[in-house]
Amino acid sequence: MNPFGILEAETPEEAAAAEPVRSSVRGRSRDETVDAEVDERGGLLSLRIPRHLLRGAHTEPLCRAVVEAVAHARHQAGQLARERARTRVDLAHSRRARTRR
């Protein structure tokens, strides 16, 4: 920790884990017709729907596929965020253990 209270990375792994990562995650509906992309916080970035589904008269299956794709992408984004947080906590604990010795 530097004089300003900021943890400094000592290894390349620590530097990579400490760096904020801007990423996106994709999810797909169960029937694989709709793809959704969300940011690391679960905000919707894009939605891919085949044209023929937009022209159909039956909207219920399409709505279901959209909800499934977005939910799947958000679930994956949450898992990624938890893994990153866990890595940061583990690194902070290992740094504290090293400085106490």
Image (tube, helix red, strand yellow):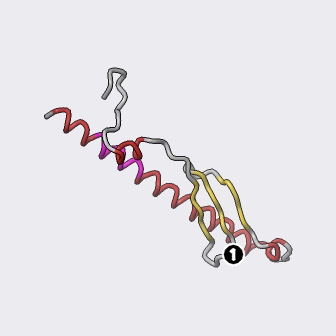
Q: Where does residue 12 sit, x and y in percent of width and height?
A: 36, 45
Front residue (pair 3, 43): 3
- Does the magenta stretch mainly form a helix, a strand or a loop? helix
Tell me what residue is drawn at x 56 percent, y 52 percent: 23
The quadrant of the image that shows the C terminus is: top left
The quadrant of the image that shows the N terminus is: top left
Residue 95's image quarter?
Answer: top left
* Residue identifier under label 1: 33
| Pointer 1 local density, CA inside 10 Å: few below 14, some 14–19, many at least 20 | some
Q: Where does residue 25 sit, x and y in percent of width and height?
A: 57, 59
The residue lying furthest to the front in this view is: 12
In the image, 91: left or right of 99? Answer: right
Q: Where does residue 56 sit, x and y in percent of width and height?
A: 84, 77
Residue 71's image quarter?
Answer: bottom right
In the image, 61: left or right of 71? Answer: right
Q: Is residue 20 magenta?
A: no
Name above or below for residue 9 compared with residue 48.
above
The local secondary structure at tag 1 comes to loop
Front residue (pair 18, 63): 18
Tell me what residue is drawn at x 40 percent, y 54 percent: 83
Which stretch appears magenta? Answer: 84-92
In the image, 77: left or right of 29? Answer: left
Front residue (pair 98, 40): 98
